[in-house]
Amino acid sequence: MKTYYNPDDLKKFGKIGEFQKPLADKFFSYYGDVFKEGALTEREKSLIALAVSHAVQCPYCIDAYTVDTLEKGCDEEEMMEAVHVAAAIRSGATLVHGVQMMNKTKDVSM
Amino acid sequence: MSTATKSLKKQNSEFSNIDYQLKVLHHGVKDQNLDSFSTKLKETNLFPLTTTGLDIFQINMGKMCNQVCSHCHVDAGPDRKEIMSKETLQECLDAIAKSEIKTVDLTGGAPEMNPHFRWFVEQAYKLDCKVIVRCNLTIIVANKKYFDLPEFYKENEVEIVSSLPHYSEKKTDSQRGDGVFDRSIRALMMLNEVGYGMEGSGLTLNLVYNPSGAFLPPNQDGLEKQFKRKLKKDFDIEFNSLFAITNIPISRYLDYLVASENFMGYMQKLANSYNPVAAEGVMCRNTISVGWDGYLYDCDFNQMLELKVAVADKKRQHVKDFDSQTLIDRKIIVNEHCFGCTAGAGSSCGGEIA
């Protein structure tokens, strides 16, 4: 069955340079640096990446950062809490627009 | 992962067959167009893999165990009856006495279930050896005849290395069986009580983490801090160091990988994570591993795959004809499972290598 997403495509991510190498090289170099230990630990960065993967709903990223967080020693509870952070921000972002809806409603109502 | 109650051997599983395991491993590499382990060693100027000395004498005292862990490379369990005899243990002592070896590392199964275990530890201690026991913790609380093990270890200044795959009950029990976490915590408290893991006691208690699934272990230092924080906070337990060990794709873990359709991905990950620095420091380079029947192997994993040491004189493959120089001069047998020891930061019985 053909689908838009193929798990094997994740392994081919590095090949995006075939069509545009200089920008791919810059991206992967930047990407590598971002995830290195800095003011935040690699573990903290991996949990952030897992949360963001859910927020942007990228199946490749979810697969990759589920394994990565496990390999950084995170447990299921921590991982699910990270997903809840993403969910809370997404739902909060929806709900805070309710203020705009309320404002507009009041503007056009007697 | 879920735990079984019978060994693969008892279940007549094809994964208890050595040839079958080697065939699966071979396909895991070849079918994905990955370089073989030997090729990787050649590319990094490490082939043939040779020894750097003979420092550690590791004895597998038998395959009998009170647990049936889902990742066990020994396929150990209560139904395994292979136990090292006193005669073979004496041959081990004779071999140690005539060599320069000062570290004796006891594993199993549960080595404590060997009826000659205490006698052997005392004899090795008298030979002025540092004795390491790979204790599964739960054996200490399994039966009252084992309750005094912490005191016995202390008297013989034994170094304890114990598996605790996670500080969470769920993850530990999923790999080692229901109730194992609780019993392990009780045993750790008993070890702490006699001084093990406590600052200034001189009694070493190291823990072993290994992943509860098809992924590689985390950075050892970071994980050790986490384990120390959690075990102290939740149970007031202390220990010395944490060893992060990679699961080697043989026996029960190989069975799990294949059944869960993670095998190909895991082999690819191991092969792609090959680290020449880790390869240079693999434990087989200064260790000799003795099987329950006295035969000699490069490591406990080669032992389970029945790959005996490569020495010209076949009688030197047995501990009764132990000859240090012959073993130091040997070439180490490698196969695709060896990728498990060279991935990322590497893996040994003492944790990370690189």
Image (cartoon, rainbow, N blue to C red):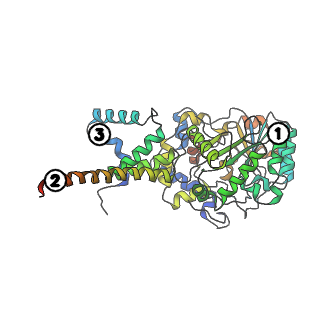
Same chain shared by disc 3 and disc 1: no
Choose between A80 and B313: the one closer to the eye: A80
Which of B172 and B260 lies nearest the eye of the viewer?
B172
Q: Determine the residue located farthest toward the bottom in the rendered image.
A: B11
In the rendered structure, which amino acid carries the disc numbered 3? Glu
* Image quadrant in which you'd find residue A106: bottom left
| CB within 8 Å, label 3 to label 2 | no
Asked whether the viewer can see residue B65, the reply is: yes
For badge 2, the amino acid type reads: Lys
Q: Say whether disc 3 or disc 2 marks the residue closer to the N-terminus.
A: 3
| Circle number at residue B114 | none
Of tags 1 and 2, which is closer to the observer?
A: 2
Q: Which residue is mark 3?
A: A18
Residue appearing at x 82%, y 59% in the figure: B144
Which residue occupies 83% across, 45% down? B121
Q: Callout 2: residue from which chain?
A: A
Mark in front: 3 vs 2 = 2
Q: Residues within 10 Å of mark 2 (few under 14, many from 20)?
A: few
Contact between labelled residues 1 and 3, with CB atoms less than 8 Å apart: no
Q: Chain of mark 3?
A: A
In the image, taking residue B160 as reference, residue A100 lies left or right, namely: left
The residue indicated by pointer 1 is: B96
Disc 3 from disc 2: Cα separation: 49 Å
Residue found at the very far front of the displayed protein: A110
Q: Are marks 3 and 2 on the same chain?
A: yes
Residue B235 placement (x, y as % from top left)? 66, 49
Query: Would you say A61 lies left or right of B253 here?
Result: left
- Mark 3 Cα-neighbour bin, 10 Å: few <14, some 14–19, many ≥20: few
Mark 1 residue type: Ile
Residue A10 seen by the camera: no
- How far apart are the alpha carbons under marks 3 and 1? 59 Å
1 and 2 marks on the same chain: no
